[in-house]
Image (cartoon, rainbow, N blue to C red):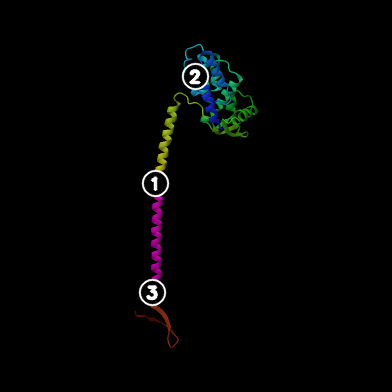
Amino acid sequence: MDIEQKQAEHIDCFVKQASNQKGPALASVITEATSHPSLFAFSEILSVPTVLELQGTEHSVYLELLRLFAHGTWSEYKSVADRLPHLLPDQVLKLKQLTVLTLAETNKVLPYEGLMQELDVSNVRELEDFLINECMYVGIVRGKLDQLRRCFEVQFAAGRDLRPGQLGNMIQTLSNWLVTSDNLLVSIQEKIKWADTMSELDKKHGKEVEEKVEEVKKSLKKLKTVSRPTLTSEGTRRSTLKVE
């Protein structure tokens, strides 16, 4: 079972739990969801009415925490940690994994220095162990560790929840890509048409050349039959004209 299928099952389970809970019980569901080792998407849970009803209540910090796990990073949490619930070790790990996914969204080559700063990792060995054991082995990213260049080359990264407003930008990007693809397709079709036309011209030219060659051959044969050298009685060569 791939990571998308696992996600779908876990999301469905937590959505059902969240729909049937309120207040402190709902806070426990959010804590469990953000601690789950195989869950990396939270937008569906965020859209549950009972979760949205936490806004403005004494448990609203759990709604903010869930939003952070949906869109934020470890460094963002540290900047607001004083007004959010203290994270459990599993939540810290999860948020650092999500941070790697965020960085991989825009860059396919991640320098070690930047990763160590974002993840609060003190040395390269610890960073590489984290990338291997907590990211690649889990299946959320694939890539190559380049110790010589001190970077992580991303080959695949699971997508995160879309941030507010990000959908519009994504639609615009896809629309631009579609227009570019259409223009490229037209250009390719025109080149194919040009190639076909040139091929036909080459065939026509080749046929004309063959016809001219045949005409020349016929002319040469006719000349050979018209003028032939003959030997006279005196032993000298003369040309005898053959009248048709």
Q: Secondary structure at mark 3?
A: helix
Q: Could you give the CA–CA distance between mark 2 and mark 1, rounded to whole angstroms?
A: 57 Å
* 210 w.r.t. 99: above or below: below
Callout 1, which amino acid? Glu
**Would you name the residue on which mark 3 appears?**
222
**Would you name the residue on which mark 1 appears?**
190
* 149 w.r.t. 14: above or below: below
Left or right side of 214 for 130: right
Residue at the spot x=56%, y=18% of the render? Answer: 31
Find residue 118 and name its label: none
Q: Main secondary structure of the magenta part?
A: helix
**Would you name the residue on which mark 2 appears?**
19
Residue at the spot x=62%, y=29% of the render? Answer: 133
Q: Between tags 3 and 1, which lies in front?
A: 1
Residue 151 image-quadrant placement? top right
Q: Between tags 2 and 3, which lies in front?
A: 2
